[in-house]
Image: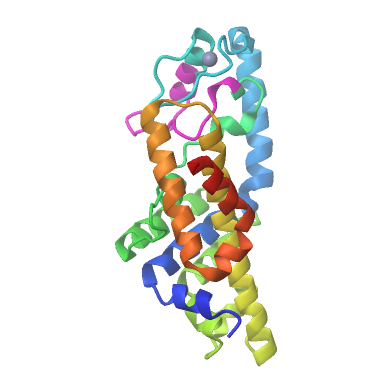
């Protein structure tokens, strides 16, 4: 079977959870992007207009978080940090600073929006598996988030797509053995054997997109100078991901170039 290995992976419930949760983030991102982009650009412009000191470039061009903490940054980045915190909706909650780039705050309004805890937990899950109880908390948070944007007409469709994705059993489609009515709204058709094959192709494509995103993130981190702790953690995760890809022949073929890059880093 063409998708035999994918089917095997999807028999692992927690891996399937990981894939579905990642897919939901992309659905959410695509749905929110036009709105958030406009709002963040306006917010960013407003901050710069109100506080001319925020126009000062980063003094080092290399201020960055350590683990998820942001300390020992230059005066310019420290000012941005203070302003971001003052606009945080829940001042007492933890702000995850990892994954952000302080020198870009002045010029890139999207950098302001990266404080997304679930995305980090999901992408940093070292074995690409998440448990059912995590999924339940995730679904509650996603629903809560989507409903905060209920004034945007497109969000009703986003909520529906997310609910479909969380309730669909992907392993059925990868094996091509069964049919489900709810599948149509997530882009799957189940009327014929040939269409089922397309469905498995689509799942395979989703999986590849997620793995590619994580690979690029880790390869990028491996190439950038960081502190020792972060570097060790990223290197370990990169090796784990490389091992996972190698253990799955279809993924090893698809990501052969990235695996070569990992091997050369190891060397
Ligand atoms: Zn700085």
Residue 223 on image: x %, y %: 55, 33
Can residue 189 be seen here? The reply is no
x 33%, y 63%: residue: 131
Q: Is residue 213 above or below residue 225?
A: below
Q: Is residue 64 above or below residue 170?
A: above
Residue 135 on image: x %, y %: 37, 61
- Position of 5 with respect to 47 (left or right) is left
- Position of 235 with respect to 26 (left or right) is left
Residue 216 on image: x %, y %: 58, 45
Magenta stretch prevailing secondary structure = loop
x 48%, y 50%: residue: 145
Image quadrant containing the N terminus: bottom right
x 52%, y 41%: residue: 265
- Position of 221 with respect to 39 (left or right) is left
- Position of 227 with respect to 211 (left or right) is left
Circle count: 0
Q: Which residues are drawn in magenta?
A: 81-103
Q: Residue furthest front?
A: 267
Residue 33 on image: x %, y %: 65, 46
**256 or 195, which lies in front?**
256
The quarter of the displayed image where residue 38 is located:
top right
Can residue 109 be seen here? The reply is yes
x 56%, y 63%: residue: 252
Q: Is residue 147 above or below residue 48?
A: below
**253 or 190, which lies in front?**
253
Q: Is residue 264 above or below residue 60?
A: below
Q: State the colouring used for the structure image.
A: rainbow
């Amino acid at each position: 079977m063409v998708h035999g290995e994918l089917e095997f992976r999807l028999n692992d419930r927690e891996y399937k959870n990981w894939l579905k949760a990642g897919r939901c983030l992309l659905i959410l991102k695509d749905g929110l992007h036009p709105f958030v982009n406009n709002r963040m650009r306006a917010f960013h412009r407003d901050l710069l207009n109100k506080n001319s000191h925020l126009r000062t470039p980063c003094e080092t061009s290399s201020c960055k978080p350590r683990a998820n903490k942001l300390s020992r940054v230059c005066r310019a980045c420290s000012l941005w940090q203070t302003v971001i915190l003052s606009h945080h909706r829940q001042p007492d909650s933890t702000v995850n600073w990892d994954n952000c780039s302080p020198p870009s705050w002045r010029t890139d309004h999207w950098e302001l929006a990266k404080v997304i805890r679930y995305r980090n937990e999901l992408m940093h899950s070292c074995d690409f598996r998440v448990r059912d109880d995590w999924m339940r908390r995730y679904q509650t948070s996603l629903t809560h988030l989507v409903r905060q944007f209920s004034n945007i007409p497109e969000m009703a469709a986003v909520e529906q797509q997310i609910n479909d994705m969380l309730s669909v059993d992907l392993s059925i489609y990868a094996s091509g053995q069964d049919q489900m009515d709810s599948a149509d709204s997530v882009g799957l058709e189940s009327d014929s054997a040939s269409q089922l094959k397309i469905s498995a192709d689509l799942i395979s494509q989703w999986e590849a997109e997620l793995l590619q995103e994580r690979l690029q993130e880790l390869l990028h981190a491996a190439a950038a100078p960081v502190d020792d702790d972060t570097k060790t953690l990223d290197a370990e995760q990169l090796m784990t991901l490389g091992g996972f890809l190698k253990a799955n022949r279809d993924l090893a073929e698809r990501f052969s170039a990235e695996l070569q890059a990992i091997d050369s880093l190891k060397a």
